Image: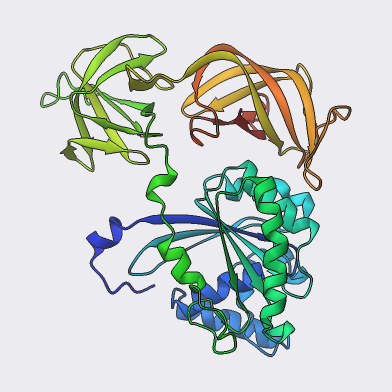
C-alpha cells in the first residue's frame, strides 16, 4: 500500500474499527474487496492472485471476496467462516475491518469481531429484504453497544436499481430501530459487485443523494465513542529500570480505559485505597500534560505507594463499582456448555480473578429477543444472563457506561481455553 502523505500525519490519524455482518451470500466479503480495490489499498501481487483464482473458477468478474475469504474451506464453499481482519487507510482516516460470518453457528465469531468496533456495517440483499439473520445481527450490534450502524442495501443491480424497493427495506428496518435501541443508523443503497455507491456515486441511482459508503466511514465521528467522563487506568506493567540514571523511577504503564488524566490530578489506587497525585504522564518517550481514553501511557505518582498489575488508578471523586458479585450477559464460545457452579478464571481489564457461576437467570433467543427462563442449557453460540461471584472484588463500570471496564472473558484454568465473553449489566 502506498501512502502519499506524511508518516507523522498517518500515525496521528483517527482510527475507525468496523465490523461487517449479514446473511450468507449477502455480499459482505465482496463489499470489503470492492472497498479495498477501489480505494487502491491492495498490492499488485494480491490483485494478480485473485484475478488468476477467479479465472480458474470460470467467473466473469474478478472475485473480490477472495481478498477476505482467506481460508481454503471458505473459498471452496464461497462463505466466510472465520473472522478476517483487513487494514486500509485514506488521507482522512485509518480503518480496521472485521469480516464476520453470517451463519448462526458462528455467532461467537461475530461477537469477537464486533466487540471492539466503532461501527457495524450490516448488509441486506435487496432481493430478499430483512431476514431473521438481519434482525439477529442488529440485535447483537445493539447488545454490544456498537455506537454507529450502517445498513447497506446490497445487490441493487439485481432489482433494477429501484428506489421503491430500497425505501421499502429502509421502512422495515426503521420499525426495528426503537426496539433494538440503535443510536445512530444510516442507510446506503449499493452494488458491491459493480461498485455503485462504494467509493464513487452511482450513475444508476441518481435518486440517492446521500453519502457513498467510504464518505460515511470517513465522516462517522469516533472521538465520543469512548467514555470521556469516568477516568479509568488499569495498570498493565510496572516500569522499574534499576539503572543509575533512573534509580528511583517507578512508572505505571497501561492504556487509559476511559476519561482523561492530567498532571496534578488527585487519584486513588484500587484496591488499596491509597491516594496520591499524578507527577508525570509519558507517551511515546515524551512527557505530556494530559492522557485521553485509548492512549497508552506511563504514569508516575508523587508518592511511592504499592500498586501492581491488575490494580486500577482512578480519580478520587469518581470511583468505579467494587463488588465480588455481578450480573452479566454472556456469549458462550466453547463446545463444552456453561456449568452452573462451575469454576472459571475471569479476566477483566488487566485483572485475573477466580470465579464461579452462581446463577443462570435466563437464556436469550436472539431471533425473537425473548428471555427463556426455563431453558438453562447454555451451549456454544448461546447468549444468556448470569450471576457471577469472584473470589476477590473487581473494579468495574456497567458495559453500557464503559465497554472496556464493563467487559470480561471467562477462561478454563486447566486448558487455558476461552469459554465465553461477558458484558456487565
Question: Which of the 4 image quadrants contains residue 359?
Answer: top right
User: As drawn, is 12 to the left or to the right of 308?
Assistant: left
Question: Which of the 4 image quadrants contains residue 347?
Answer: top right
Q: Which residue is painted at 53% across and 30% down in the image?
A: 406
Q: Which residue is painted at 74% across and 51% down in the image?
A: 136
Q: Nearer the viewer, residue 121 or 33?
A: 121
Q: Nearer the viewer, residue 114 or 321?
A: 321
Furthest-left residue in this view: 245
Can you say which quadrant of the picture contains the C terminus? top right
Q: Which residue is painted at 60% across and 49% down in the image?
A: 182
Q: Which residue is painted at 66% across and 65% down in the image?
A: 123
- Please say which color scheme the image uses: rainbow
Question: Which of the 4 image quadrants contains residue 11?
Answer: bottom left
Relative to 77, residue 301 above or below: above
State the image coordinates of residue 329 (x, y, percent, origin top left).
67, 31
User: As drawn, is 236 to the left or to the right of 305?
Assistant: right
State the image coordinates of residue 179 (x, y, percent, origin top left).
69, 46
Relative to 327, residue 141 above or below: below
Relative to 114, residue 385 above or below: above
State the image coordinates of residue 34 (x, y, percent, origin top left).
55, 76
- Count of numbered circles on the image: 0
State the image coordinates of residue 382 (x, y, percent, origin top left).
77, 39
User: As drawn, is 58 to the left or to the right of 313?
Assistant: right
Residue 109 visible at all: no
Q: Nearer the viewer, residue 308 or 226?
A: 226
Q: Nearer the viewer, residue 263 or 416?
A: 263
Can you say which quadrant of the picture contains the N terminus? bottom left
Residue 175 visible at all: yes
Amino acid at each position: 500500500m502506498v501512502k502519499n502523505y506524511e508518516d507523522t500525519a498517518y500515525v496521528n490519524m483517527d482510527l475507525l474499527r468496523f465490523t461487517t455482518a449479514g446473511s450468507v451470500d449477502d455480499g459482505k466479503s465482496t463489499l470489503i474487496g470492492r472497498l479495498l480495490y477501489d480505494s487502491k489499498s491492495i498490492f499488485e501481487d494480491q490483485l494478480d492472485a485473485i484475478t488468476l483464482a477467479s479465472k480458474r473458477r470460470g467467473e466473469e468478474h474478478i472475485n473480490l471476496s477472495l481478498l477476505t475469504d482467506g481460508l481454503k474451506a471458505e473459498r471452496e464453499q464461497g462463505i466466510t467462516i472465520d473472522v478476517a481482519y483487513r487494514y486500509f487507510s485514506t488521507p482522512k482516516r485509518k480503518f480496521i475491518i472485521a469480516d464476520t460470518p453470517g451463519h448462526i453457528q458462528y455467532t461467537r465469531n461475530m461477537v469477537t469481531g464486533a466487540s471492539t468496533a466503532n461501527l457495524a456495517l450490516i448488509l441486506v440483499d435487496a432481493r430478499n429484504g430483512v431476514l431473521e439473520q438481519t434482525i439477529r445481527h442488529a440485535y447483537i450490534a445493539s447488545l454490544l453497544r456498537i455506537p454507529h450502524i450502517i445498513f447497506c442495501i446490497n445487490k441493487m443491480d439485481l432489482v433494477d436499481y429501484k428506489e421503491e424497493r430500497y425505501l421499502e427495506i429502509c421502512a422495515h428496518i426503521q420499525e426495528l430501530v426503537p426496539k433494538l435501541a440503535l443510536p445512530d443508523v444510516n442507510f446506503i443503497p449499493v452494488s458491491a459487485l459493480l461498485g455503485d455507491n462504494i467509493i464513487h456515486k452511482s450513475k444508476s441511482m441518481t435518486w440517492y443523494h446521500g453519502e457513498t459508503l467510504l464518505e460515511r466511514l470517513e465522516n462517522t465521528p469516533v472521538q465520543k465513542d469512548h467514555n470521556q467522563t469516568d477516568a479509568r487506568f488499569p495498570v498493565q506493567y510496572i516500569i522499574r529500570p534499576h539503572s543509575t540514571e533512573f534509580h528511583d523511577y517507578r512508572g505505571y504503564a497501561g492504556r487509559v480505559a476511559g476519561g482523561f488524566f492530567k498532571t496534578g490530578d488527585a487519584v486513588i489506587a484500587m484496591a488499596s485505597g491509597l491516594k496520591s497525585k499524578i507527577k508525570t504522564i509519558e507517551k511515546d518517550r515524551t512527557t505530556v500534560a494530559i492522557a485521553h481514553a485509548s492512549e497508552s501511557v506511563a504514569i508516575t505518582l508523587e508518592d511511592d505507594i504499592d500498586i501492581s498489575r491488575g490494580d486500577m488508578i482512578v480519580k478520587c471523586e469518581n470511583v468505579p463499582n467494587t463488588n465480588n458479585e455481578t450480573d452479566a450477559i454472556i456469549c458462550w464460545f466453547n463446545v463444552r456448555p456453561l456449568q452452573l457452579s462451575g469454576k472459571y478464571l475471569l479476566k477483566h481489564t488487566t485483572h485475573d480473578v477466580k470465579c464461579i457461576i452462581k446463577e443462570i437467570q435466563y437464556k436469550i433467543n436472539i431471533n425473537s429477543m425473548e428471555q427463556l427462563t426455563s431453558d438453562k442449557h447454555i451451549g456454544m453460540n448461546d447468549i444468556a444472563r448470569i450471576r457471577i461471584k469472584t473470589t476477590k472484588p473487581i473494579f468495574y463500570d456497567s458495559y453500557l457506561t464503559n465497554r472496556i471496564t464493563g467487559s470480561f472473558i471467562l477462561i478454563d484454568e486447566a486448558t487455558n481455553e476461552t469459554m465465553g465473553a461477558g458484558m456487565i449489566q
